[in-house]
Image (cartoon, helix red, strand yellow):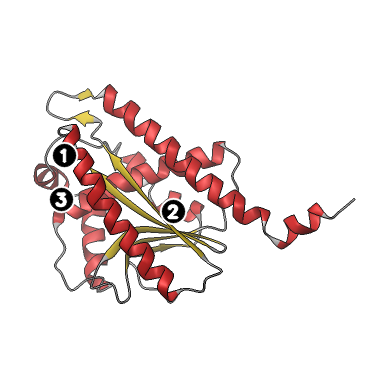
Amino acid sequence: MNIRSMYYFSSISQFNIFSSFLDECKWKIEKQLLKERVIQYQSHPMFIQMRNKFNENDISIFPLKSEEIITWFDTMLILKRITSELFHKGISMENTSIFMEYPLIYGNHMRSDYLIVYDRLIIVLEFGMFNQDEKRSEERYTKKLQESINHRQILANMIHSNVEVVNYVMIYRPEYDRYIKREIVENINYNHNETKLLANFIANKVKLQQEFSALAQLEKISF
């Protein structure tokens, strides 16, 4: 695939196989500061691999921050949950591609967290984490939403109008305190609800694409 990104997954299955290391290491979205989590996990083989992959693929003119790798682990875990939710909804998305850390052409060196591509649909997916007060969380969402809108507009301006380009932002919360070894149940429930909302959004968009497929149109006129 001649499309530049840090990682390209040609199917949901390929993404799930790649991200299975998260299950193996029992990854948790921790409450601790990102810089503390970097110190804790910087020797993990996948941490090192992702750092090297970013540099090899020449994704950005800006140097990679180690904290970003931790957020990649977190967001891949959430995306795995979303694909599982879609599977249980009976949504067939095996012909879906996922681009991770996609550098926007003519985007002033901006990068999208993920592009989810299905048929004539592109979902620009951005994530943000916040673990303090609600006011700051709203500010974080507003900032990420504006970035997501900008990314969508840049893509839409360069892509044929028959392709639908939409954007979505999910703000997630930490689920585990490593210091006291305790789950943060309230935040787990919050993330679960946000995951379901995002899965519903994707499912509705995919269903619309499927309804306008050639086979679906033939079925409508069949007796």
**Residue 95 x/y as whole percent:** 57, 58
Image quarter of residue 196: top left
Q: Is residue 160 left or right of residue 131?
A: right
SS at circle 1: helix
SS at circle 2: helix
Residue at horizontal 64 percent and vertical 54 percent from the top: 210
Q: Is residue 32 left or right of residue 1?
A: left
Q: Where is 201 relative to 96, above or below?
A: above
Asked whether 134 or 132 is in front, the reply is 134
| Residue where numbered disc 3 is placed | 42
Residue 15 marker: 2
* Mark 3: amino acid: Gln
Reading the chain from its start, which is encountered first: label 3 or label 1?
A: 3
Q: Where is 88 relative to 21, above or below?
A: above
**Residue 181 x/y as whole percent:** 18, 24
Q: Where is 48 relative to 87, above or below?
A: below
Characterize the local packing of mark 1: few (<14), some (14-19) or many (20 or more) Cα atoms within 10 angstroms: few
* Mark 2: amino acid: Phe
Q: In this view, does 12 lie to the left or right of 40?
A: right
Figure label count = 3
